[in-house]
Image: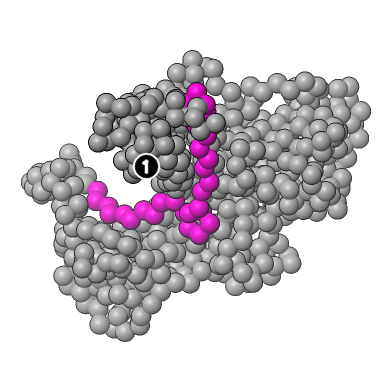
């Protein structure tokens, strides 16, 4: 029996459905304290003074942390290095607000107390002397020359400028039969995972060990970030992602609260729990928030000669670790599946007095696709053509692969037209169009939407690497260690299926372990649809190596070449003499 491709019920679901999962707020560490965060109520304001003396005197309050306490002890949170940011100065996110606040919800102080309710009550006793400033809210206005800069030292609200394209766009527009223009907006949204952000930080001074239990998609990245940003990092550090109730891109970040609690756990020598409330989650971080001005030079038959895109990405007041990624993706992926000979794309990352942004469900790709697909629809409308025909006319042809888009991406293969026509057939597209035309201007209308999108998976650069370790126990049980930790993807099941097929055992004999930086020396995490494609591939490579080693051991007992060894149904045998068998557990025991 082959397990891959079978509709198995997920192994992790029973305990989650029965309420037996372990999330951050389910963790109870002896002597634990609780933290809550005071957040800005202003979108833009100077801080003249913070008086926390009354809060510190309250019974049960252990510490009130402000930016003044962190001077020289922690660093601000920078974006991840990327070529597009080389030579660019961007505003890093402070752990706690110092001289000013730049968005509603920005952390200003942290209260630590014996329970969460005492800490919450103490917030009301902290007095902050704010001087309100005019907020900058519209990214198009913020991008204009002469606009008031949010951060005085930067001189402009344009924090990053990405340019992509090729060819003589001006010549393409000069040859056009028509020029189609559009301006679009994709609003901000909140990822809103079922479980919000949360952290338990514990420091053990005898081992100089800091352990974080975090609701994160990226345990190794979080570990590396905290070590870099604590100016006296512990000698040892461990990050554990227990059950994680959704992420959608939000939990790839390193947060101000992560750094503040790590510092406090070390300073106080006691474990600290912080779990946000839903309103905090809605204020902390957003996805999307893009606008675009688009021009397309077209022939009468709908063929696209060239396009211009000016995209404005509202990145918020500060950069977090992954803020730069979506604007870069939007600029690259806007070409979609179309063979557009010339393009001119400019994407601006613009600062506003709003919460930071970052990856959410496609990380810039859906925004770019919307701008392109809406323009295709406008071309069809202006030229009185069917929207599906305009798409067909501009698809990249199979003989042109591998194809480099005008924005610099390389598509290795594809055959878009047959897939598109099959989708139209299954949707009964022609029939619905006929009904639509027959109804004319009647009130009961039929709306039909068409879109074609190319989606990259797995990330890029170092994101395409993964680590896995396979351990075959003397009993024949298999442990798969992976740096990919699920928060809904079901990789505990899919990785077990791969292992069972590769080693010829039952899925019940496979245990998939994840979410602990002590298991593997490095890892990227779970995002960009990389879990199965990249993490699963690393697991498969490890399983192949384990199989080859076990085949050599079995070959000694069965006196045959290792190439003749077959693993099937918990048995190991020479394919030429299938009656002479060993059990998988016998071979595993022999290895030890």
On-image quarter of the C terminus: top right
Q: Residue at x 88, y 40 (%)?
A: 51
Q: Is residue 133 left or right of residue 571?
A: right
Q: Residue at x 30, y 75 (%)?
A: 341
Q: Residue at x 19, y 53 (%)?
A: 420
Categorize mark 1 by other alpha carbons within 10 Å: few (<14), some (14-19), many (20+): some
Q: Is residue 370 left or right of residue 198?
A: left
Counting from the top left corner in percent of width and height, residue 191 is at 51, 40
Whether 270 is drawn above or below 47: the answer is: above
Counting from the top left corner in percent of width and height, residue 20 is at 54, 17
Magenta stretch: residue 584 in it? no
Disc 1: which residue: 562
Magenta stretch: residue 463 in it? yes
Q: Residue at x 83, y 48 (%)?
A: 232
User: On the image, which quarter does residue 155 sit in?
Assistant: bottom right
Q: Residue 370: tell me if it is visible.
A: no
- What is the chief secondary structure element of the magenta stretch? loop
The colour scheme is: one colour
Local secondary structure at mark 1: helix
Counting from the top left corner in percent of width and height, residue 369 is at 36, 56
On-image quarter of the N terminus: top left
Instruction: In the displayed orientation, state which residue is furthest to the top.
Output: 18
Counting from the top left corner in percent of width and height, residue 303 is at 21, 70
Whether 116 is drawn above or below 252: the answer is: above
Q: Which residues are magenta?
A: 449-476
Whether 23 is drawn above or below 148: the answer is: above
């Amino acid at each position: 029996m082959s397990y891959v491709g079978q509709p198995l019920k997920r192994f992790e679901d029973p305990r989650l459905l029965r309420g037996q999962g372990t999330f951050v707020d389910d963790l109870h560490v002896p002597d634990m304290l609780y933290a809550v965060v005071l957040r800005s109520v202003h979108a833009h304001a100077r801080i003249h003074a913070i008086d926390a003396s009354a809060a510190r005197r309250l019974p049960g309050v252990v510490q009130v942390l402000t930016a003044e306490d962190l001077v020289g002890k922690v660093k601000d949170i920078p974006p991840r290095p990327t070529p597009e940011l080389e030579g660019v100065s961007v505003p890093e996110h402070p752990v706690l607000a110092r001289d000013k606040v730049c968005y509603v919800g920005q952390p200003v102080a942290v209260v630590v107390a014996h329970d969460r309710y005492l800490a919450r009550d103490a917030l009301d006793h902290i007095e902050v002397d704010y001087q309100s400033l005019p907020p900058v809210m519209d990214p198009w206005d913020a991008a204009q020359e002469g606009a008031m800069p949010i951060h005085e030292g930067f001189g402009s609200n344009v924090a990053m400028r990405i340019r992509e394209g090729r060819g003589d766009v001006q010549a393409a527009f000069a040859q056009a039969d028509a020029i189609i223009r559009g301006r679009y907006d994709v609003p901000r949204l909140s990822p809103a995972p079922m479980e919000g952000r949360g952290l338990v930080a514990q420091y053990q001074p005898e081992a100089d060990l800091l352990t974080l239990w975090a609701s994160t998609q990226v345990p190794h990245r979080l570990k590396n970030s905290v070590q870099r940003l604590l100016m006296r990092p512990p000698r040892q550090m461990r990050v554990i992602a227990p059950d994680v109730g959704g992420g959608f891109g939000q939990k790839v970040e390193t947060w101000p609260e992560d750094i503040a609690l790590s510092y406090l756990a070390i300073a106080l020598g006691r474990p600290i729990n912080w779990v946000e409330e839903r309103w905090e989650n809605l204020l902390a971080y957003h996805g999307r928030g893009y606008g675009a001005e688009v021009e397309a030079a077209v022939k009468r038959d709908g063929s696209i000669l060239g396009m211009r895109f000016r995209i404005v990405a509202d990145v918020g007041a500060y950069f977090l670790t992954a803020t730069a990624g979506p604007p870069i993706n939007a600029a690259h992926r806007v070409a979609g599946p179309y063979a557009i000979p010339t393009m001119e794309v400019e994407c601006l990352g613009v600062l506003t007095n709003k919460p930071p942004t970052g990856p959410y469900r496609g990380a810039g790709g859906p925004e770019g696709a919307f701008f392109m697909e809406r323009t295709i629809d406008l071309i069809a409308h202006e030229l009185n053509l069917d929207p599906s025909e305009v798409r067909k006319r501009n698809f990249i042809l199979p003989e042109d692969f591998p194809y480099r888009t005008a924005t610099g991406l390389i598509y290795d293969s594809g055959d878009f037209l047959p897939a598109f026509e099959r989708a139209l057939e299954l949707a009964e597209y022609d029939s619905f169009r006929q009904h639509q035309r027959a109804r004319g201007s009647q009130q009961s209308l039929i709306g039909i939407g068409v879109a074609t999108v190319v989606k990259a998976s797995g990330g890029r650069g170092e994101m395409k690497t993964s680590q896995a370790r396979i351990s075959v126990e003397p009993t024949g049980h298999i442990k798969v260690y992976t740096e990919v930790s699920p928060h809904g993807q079901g990789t505990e099941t899919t990785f077990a299926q791969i292992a069972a097929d590769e080693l010829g055992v039952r899925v019940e004999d496979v245990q998939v372990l994840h979410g602990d930086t002590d298991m593997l020396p490095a890892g990227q995490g779970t995002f960009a649809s990389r879990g199965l494609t990249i993490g699963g591939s690393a697991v498969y490579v490890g399983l192949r190596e384990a199989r080859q080693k076990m085949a050599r051991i079995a070959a000694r007992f069965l006196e045959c070449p290792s190439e003749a060894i077959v693993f099937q149904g918990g048995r190991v045998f020479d394919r030429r003499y299938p009656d002479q068998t060993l059990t998988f557990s016998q071979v595993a025991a022999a290895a030890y």
